[in-house]
Amino acid sequence: YMGNDISILGEKEICEKYSIQRPEQLIDILGLWGDASDNIPGIKGIGEVTAKQLIAEFGSIENMIQQSDTISNVKLRQKIKEGTEIAMMSKMLATIMLDVPINLNEDDLKFKTPDFNTLKSLFEQLEFKTLAQRVFADFSKKKEVPLPDLFSSLENKEEEQLTEDGVSSIYNTPHDYQLIQSYDELKKLAHSIQPSSLLCFDTETDGLDLINVRMLGLSISIEAFKAYYIQMPASYEETCRWMEVLKPVFENPQVLKIAQNLKFDMQVLLRYGVEVKGECFDTLLAHYIIEPEIRHNLDLLAKSYLNYETVTFEQLTGSSTKKTSIADVPIEKLKDYACEDADITLRLYHILEKQLHENEGHKLFKEIEMPLVPVLASMEQKGVHIDTDFLNTYAAELQIKAKAIETNIYELAGEVFNISSPKQLGIILFEKLKIIENAKLTKTKQYQTGEEILQKLEHKHPIIPLILEYRGIMKLKSTYAEAFPNLVNPHTGRVHTSFNQAITATGRLSSSNPNLQNIPIRNDEGREIRKAFIPANEEFILLAADYSQIELRLMAAMSGDESMFESFCNGEDIHAATASKIYNVPLPEVSREMRRNAKTVNFGIIYGISAFGLSERLNISRKEAAEIIEQYFNKYPKVKQYMEKQKEFAQQHGYVETIMKRRRYLRDIYSNNSIVRGVAERNAINAPIQGSAADMIKAAMIKIYEEIQKRKLKSAIVLQVHDELVFDVYKPELEEMKAIVHDGMIHAMPITVPLEIDMKSGNNWLEAH
């Protein structure tokens, strides 16, 4: 034990404290629970107790995700499904990297005053402008702190400490934050801000449900260190009247609108009859382009760029155990919190706007990410109709199927057991049935029974395919057929998913509440779920449009390989054409198996597949797989050159980029660990292709949305899933919409390879797919 309430815990004490078997499992607990002090989010709604229980049961986050369908608590299971990406990112943030190449000399760790001239020159060379400001400010404020005497005052100790550390906050930074509480004051404010060329704003609401949310107030800033908080009336009608006063500013296309997470604020204002028009700047999205793989919340950005500690939402409303509703927070506190948000966002704008230009990200920001915001906001507001009667019936059918399979499994096992229990299943498979010798164990000494393991054992015993089928059916039942009806908004009769624009490192959109990106399509039972997605009413029909083999086409364009380019220009089946080349047979003689293998190779190459990986997928020898890959590169030599160039570029710059200059930073490209470096090299090959496909679908969405708005059509975009767009189309507009969609997708971005769009309409998503 040390002073100041600091305890030193060994392995045994850590395991006892957190109910784990190994100290490193604490990383998994933090991945679920989060750690506010280190900006690790964790899964929303999962606390310390639940995190401990889950890791005690599953051993790791990866095992928990793989076996999440075995979790009986429906709400918890749903939280995990929705929070999979956040959990994995949080685990990464909580992990201390042990393979960073550092040659440690303890003498170098002693504090020394730097050579400021050398440091200034280095910062200028590396363009570390923000860091330079912070470091020089730090040293300029350093001063000897005298020992306190008996008569020293302890007042303002916190504020003095903040100044000494060089960290700014609302307590030690001069500011002018004003409260607006009357209609007359609002009119004066509107008049005073009207000449401004920019407007930074932030809404305060009583929740996150954008269909029914109530706006409590609105903060506005047009110059640094000065902001206003408008406390809105209690009634919806009166708030709409107040917003009419501000409407001319928000709808003036000449005024630049600035916000943090603009999509949310845009939808809030729309509920009160105000449309945000003209050029906009979202600081969250700007930072996403600059640093795509870290968090983008305002508190973190303020600390990183301004060396400023904001008042956090938790400080304002209290901890989870003693939480106060934001509507009940004292108005002076709420005013300071809201004004600070608008003020800090405005100050960040000036920094991030310059960085976008310096990082060559401004074109991507201005032409793709910002124009996409109103498109996604519209999709979220519109939502998609769900046939709950169909899902209820289908859930019952799946239960009957599962019961029948369950009976067959029990017969083959020779006993009844809990199929959803990894522990019991492992004992049946590897101890009773002895399917294989020396079965793999988890770190908690249980048999590994994950999907990937069982798929390799399918041919070993008839019970394995049945278990995989049973799991698939139970997942469909719990995750979709039973869960989706509960997600239908009672006021609209639709599901309103959230489209996340700033989560994936590749630039792809993701969705949550619910996640519509993972709706299964590989088997008949999974595809049936798409029947539940239906048009608004009998006057409408669904239209689905999908890019055909977009990533392979982008590979042909970006590598400049003439042979692959020619196949696409001739309208050939690319997988059959590839099979013809690597197996040296005429195109008409390509067998189904050859084509299937070629398809695996085509998509595997994009992801930098190895001979070992290909052999595993095709169930062939490693030698045969290596020969196929060699033949592939002989026939498509520029694909190989492209891959090597990408790895070389990543080594030189530390990142790779898409056609639109979206950067994927690959810090592990310099790792001494060959496995870690190998992952980075595969990302160097794939990220520009996957990222360019993401940019293309976004560009298409923008073009189509703007054309729909221009023509004032009743049809709308309702879903985006991978390379597919789904539209709720007014039947008299169907042919017009087909032409708009085809033109928008074909001409989304200029590339040299011809694009192909698969398009179909129907009374549900399955018919249209």
Image: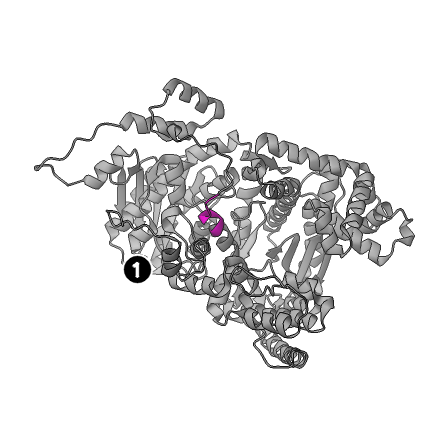
Name the residue at 58% across, 78% down.
Answer: 417
Query: Considering depth in this image, is 470 or 185 the residue closer to the camera?
Result: 470
Q: Quadrant of the C terminus?
A: bottom right
- Position above or below: 639 against 127: below
Q: Is residue 62 visible?
A: yes
Colouring of the image: one colour
Q: Residues within 10 Å of mark 1 (few under 14, many from 20)?
A: few
Q: Secondary structure at mark 1?
A: loop
Residue 357 falls within the magenta-colored stretch: no
Residues rendered magenta in the picture = 91-97
Name the residue at 76% across, 57% down.
Answer: 619
Instruction: Give the residue number, with chain letter if any, for mark 1.
Output: 323
Q: Position of residue 405 (x, y in %)?
A: 66, 78
Q: Position of residue 396 (x, y in %)?
A: 60, 79
Mark 1: amino acid: Lys
Q: Is residue 301 left or right of residue 92?
A: left
Q: Residue furthest front?
A: 438
- Position above or below: 495 against 676: below
- Position above or below: 182 against 528: above
